Amino acid sequence: MAVTRRAVLEQLTTASDSETRETTTIETIAAALEADERTIESHLHGLADCELARIRSDGSVRVTVTGEELLELELDELVIVDPGTIHPDK
Amino acid sequence: MSNSETTDPEGPQEVQYDPSSNRYDLFECSDCDNVVLVLGRDDPPVSCHNKPMERVTDLEMSVKPPDVRQVLLQTFGLPKAGLDICLCVIGEGPLSANEVAETLGYDRSTVTRYLNKLVELGLLRRSELNREAGGVVNVYHSVDLERMRRETLIGFYVWAGEAAALIEDANLTKQDYLEENPDQELPDVFWDSFPERDG
């Protein structure tokens, strides 16, 4: 069964931390999920577009505070993230 | 609508109410003009004049079958784009609003507009998450299917109630006018009572 983007986010959250800025790698996530690295990379870019993940120029990745908060909502269903909505005053 | 369908080669299919079908039922009171629509029940769910209402069995009228796109547009002001986005929430994710826009072929602004419209209608929920760079990120997620069923059905019933009241008003207007002006033309006065609404 193909790995889902949500599963990648969950694994990313396990292996990295937004507060300490601890990062992980695509290879590590792929190994943990027994999935193809290109698939993982594609999902990570999707998560980055949603501002749920950060991909550094050296290839390391970490979850963002937004990604951690999303998982804390414990939503079973799909979500659409609209990162274009910014309210800096909040 | 699976009730008796007739095919007219020169026009759209029409449908008739079929009392033997269990998709919906019409019940009426034998003592007054009360008529009710019932979904998913075999027995009369309500009584009128202290006795169970009776199933309508003698209806010969055919109607044009509703189109789901038109129903959603008329009832909720939700065009196909809105429904597409709503359906997009049933699948794999998370997805960005940009991805949804690209997948469906809509502008990003259209996606954002309808996401908010779907929240207003109670078909989606919106949560605000903190953004690392400051501010918040909006997250849209579906309500559970039972709640979505309830919201859409009740929303439609409110619309149907408004439509039924309008038809009753029209009947009464016609009746009142005929009683008050037996020797004058009806159409102008009738339509003046129901001015066309914008949008």
Image (spheres, coloured by chain):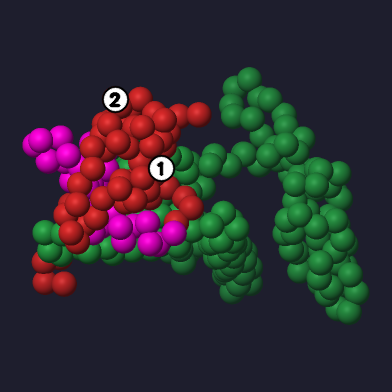
Marks 2, 1 in one chain: yes
Q: Where residue B173 sits in the image (x, y, percent)?
A: 57, 68
Q: Give the residues drawn in magenta, as a range.
A: A45-74
**In the image, residue A84 above or below residue B122:** above
Residue at x 34%, y 51% (from the top left corner): A14
Chain in red in the render: A
Q: Which mark is residue A38?
A: 2
Q: Is residue B2 visible?
A: yes
Q: Quadrant of the C terminus of chain B?
A: bottom left
Query: Residue A7, which numbered label?
Result: 1
Is residue B160 within the magenta segment?
no
Q: Colour of chain B?
A: green
Binning the other alpha carbons within 10 Å of mark 1 as few (below 14), some (14 to 19) or many (20 upward) gives some
Residue B24 versus residue B195: which sits nearer the camera?
A: B24
Q: Is residue A67 above or below residue B46?
A: above
Whichever of labels 2 and 1 marks the residue nearer the N terminus, that label is 1
Q: Quadrant of residue A24?
A: top left
Query: Quadrant of residue B63 in the image?
Result: top right
SS of the residue under disc 2: helix
